[in-house]
Each structure stands twice: as structure tokens, then as C-alpha cells.
Image: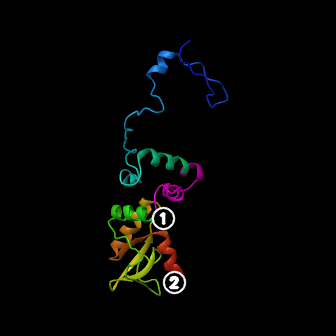
Amino acid sequence: MGDQRRGFAGNGRWRETIPAPILARLPRPAQQAGAPRQYPPPVPHEYAFLVGPLIDVGTLLLAEAEALDCGVAIHEVLLAAGWVSQDDYTAALARKLGVPAVAWHAELDLADVAYGPAAEIGLPAWRHGRPCRVLGAAAAAPDVLFGQVAALRAFGIEVVLATQRFSDALLEVR
């Protein structure tokens, strides 16, 4: 009866035999089905800034589903799974927030005490002789960090964004 396939459907049942005319239209595993379509993430999506340069929409949606299952933020899944590196995530988020991302060679001096308004936000430091706050890119969701940046800027405080590794190293030095 021609080319027919029968197999396990994955839900505990055997699937029915697929007729040959339908099988003929299906792409074979060795065939290219063409470039995958890129659909934009649901608008507005808090992590849309990652789509394109770092991940595709499918990865974002997969990370979102996993984050919901685990009760964590989407960026935590992306970072833990290795789908996005800390450096790349920090750089992309810094661009979105309009703040500089600091790296290991950054000229940053830790402040001894929290100073001024909004003292509880970020790690106080000095950069180029001016007070600033170091925010960890993975410390909160992008929308929360956006609010923190806006609050600090309202008080004239410069903000820089750091990877979790860099933030941890700063805290150890302190």
C-alpha cells in the first residue's frame, strides 16, 4: 500500500497510518523547509529588545513559558540556559535603558556610604569624579530597572549597568 508510516503519537496512543498522498507532500527530514518565519513577539513585550540581535521569537516564547512554570523572570531563564550571555544581556539592556554598561576595566570607585536621595537603589560609586549608581542587569526585570533609572535620573544621579559577575565582584571588594 505504498509509502505509509505508523508510529507512536507521544500521547500514549498509536497514530493512524498516514496515507501516501499526504506523505508525498510532507518534507523529508533531509529537505529544507525554507527559512523559519520570524513573527514579532506579542506587543509590547518587555524583552522584545533581545529579539533579532540575540535570540529569535521562538526562544523568547520558550523562555517565557519556562519562566512562568518556574516562577522566575524571563531573563533568569535565558541566562541560566545559556541562550544569552551575561555580557550580551547587559549590553542590550543598557542600550534599551540609555545608560552605559560597565566592564572590568571601568574606572569606578565604590562610595563608602549611601548618599543622597534614592539611596536604596543600586550600589553607590564614583565614576569620572561624579557620583553614580551601579545597577545589576539581572537584578530585576527590564521594566523595574527602567523605573529605577528614571527615579535616579530625576535626582540627577548617573546610572551604569553591570553584569551580575561584575556586581558581585564589586560587593566583594566593598
Mark 2 neighbour class, 10 Å CA radius: few under 14, some 14 to 19, many 20 or more: few
The structure residue drawn at horizontal position 41% and vertical position 78%, both measured from the top left corner, is: 117
In the rendered image, residue 75 lying in the magenta stretch gets the answer: yes
Q: In the rendering, which numbered label is found on residue 161?
A: none
Q: Residue 79's spot in the image, x, y percent? A: 50, 59
Dot 2: element: helix
Q: In the rendering, which numbered label is found on residue 173?
A: 2
Against 47, residue 16 (above or below) is above
Along the line of sight, which residue is nearer the eye, 162 or 43? 162
Q: Tell me the quarter of the image containing the N terminus.
A: top right
What is the magenta range? 67-85
The structure residue drawn at horizontal position 40% and vertical position 33%, both measured from the top left corner, is: 33
- N-terminal of the pair, mark 2 or mark 1, is 1
Along the line of sight, which residue is nearer the eye, 129 or 28? 28
Dot 1: element: loop
> In 3D space, how far apart are the residues under numbered discs 2 and 1 (Cα atoms)?
20 Å
Q: Residue furthest top?
A: 1
Along the line of sight, which residue is nearer the eye, 27 or 36? 27
The structure residue drawn at horizontal position 46% and vertical position 57%, both measured from the top left corner, is: 84
Q: Which residue is mark 1?
A: 138
Against 3, residue 129 (above or below) is below
Residue 6: name its quadrant: top right
Q: Nearer the viewer, mark 2 or mark 1?
A: 2
Q: Residue 154's spot in the image, x, y percent? A: 33, 72
Mark 1 neighbour class, 10 Å CA radius: few under 14, some 14 to 19, many 20 or more: many
In the rendered image, residue 35 lying in the magenta stretch gets the answer: no
Q: Residue 34's spot in the image, x, y percent? A: 37, 35
Q: Residue 108's spot in the image, x, y percent? A: 39, 82
Amino acid at the residue labelled 2: Val
